[in-house]
Image (tube, grey):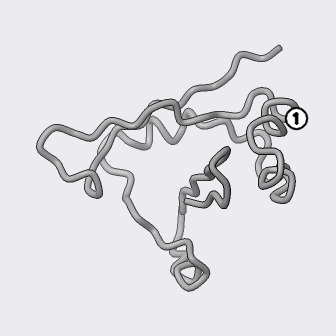
């Protein structure tokens, strides 16, 4: 997870061992379990690495909404009943309708 300002937080999903990122301040904090990949598969991937990190940091969602209108957003996260938050949660992925 990354987000130097309060307007935007980025969530990274690793598909391989990226433990080298731990020392850069991006340690893994959760694991996709069970049918969680169904949620991951709903995330819009067409923009890939196009968003500019500097613009995200300075403009936040204003930049993202203007330049990447179909970008996915996490709209809510709900902790599973009786399960510690760090162990399991359900995320709702929201995609903005194309203009």
How many labels, in total?
A: 1
Instruction: Give the quadrant of residue 5.
Output: bottom right
In the rendered view of the protein, which quadrant contains the C terminus?
top right
Question: On the picture, is 30 further left or further right than 64?
Answer: left
* Near-viewer residue (28 or 15): 28
Instruction: Give the quadrant of residue 91.
Output: top left
Q: Which residue is mark 1?
A: 67
* Near-viewer residue (42 or 90): 90
**Residue 2 drawn at (x, y percent):** 61, 60
- Going 46% across and 36% down the picture, which residue do you hit? 39
Classify 10 Å Cα crowding around label 1: few (below 14), some (14-19), many (20 and above): few
Q: Residue furthest left?
A: 82
Please, what secondary structure does the residue beneath circle 1 have? helix
For residue 53, above or below residue 97: below
For residue 30, above or below residue 63: below
- Going 27% across and 51% down the picture, which residue do you hit? 85
For residue 85, above or below residue 42: below
Instruction: Give the quadrant of residue 72.
Output: top right
In the rendered view of the protein, which quadrant contains the N terminus?
bottom right
Question: On the picture, is 24 further left or further right than 91?
Answer: right
Q: Residue furthest front?
A: 6
**Residue 94 drawn at (x, y percent):** 57, 26
Question: On the picture, is 10 further left or further right than 76?
Answer: right
């Amino acid at each position: 997870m990354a987000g130097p300002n309060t307007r935007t937080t980025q969530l990274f999903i690793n598909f391989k061992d990226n433990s080298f990122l731990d020392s850069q301040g991006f340690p893994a904090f959760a694991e996709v379990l069970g049918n969680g990949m169904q949620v991951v598969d709903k995330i819009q991937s067409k923009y890939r690495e196009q968003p500019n990190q500097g613009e995200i940091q300075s403009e936040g969602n204003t930049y993202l909404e203007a330049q990447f209108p179909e970008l996915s957003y996490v709209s809510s996260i709900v902790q599973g009943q009786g399960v510690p938050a760090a162990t399991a949660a359900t995320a709702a992925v929201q995609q903005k309708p194309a203009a």
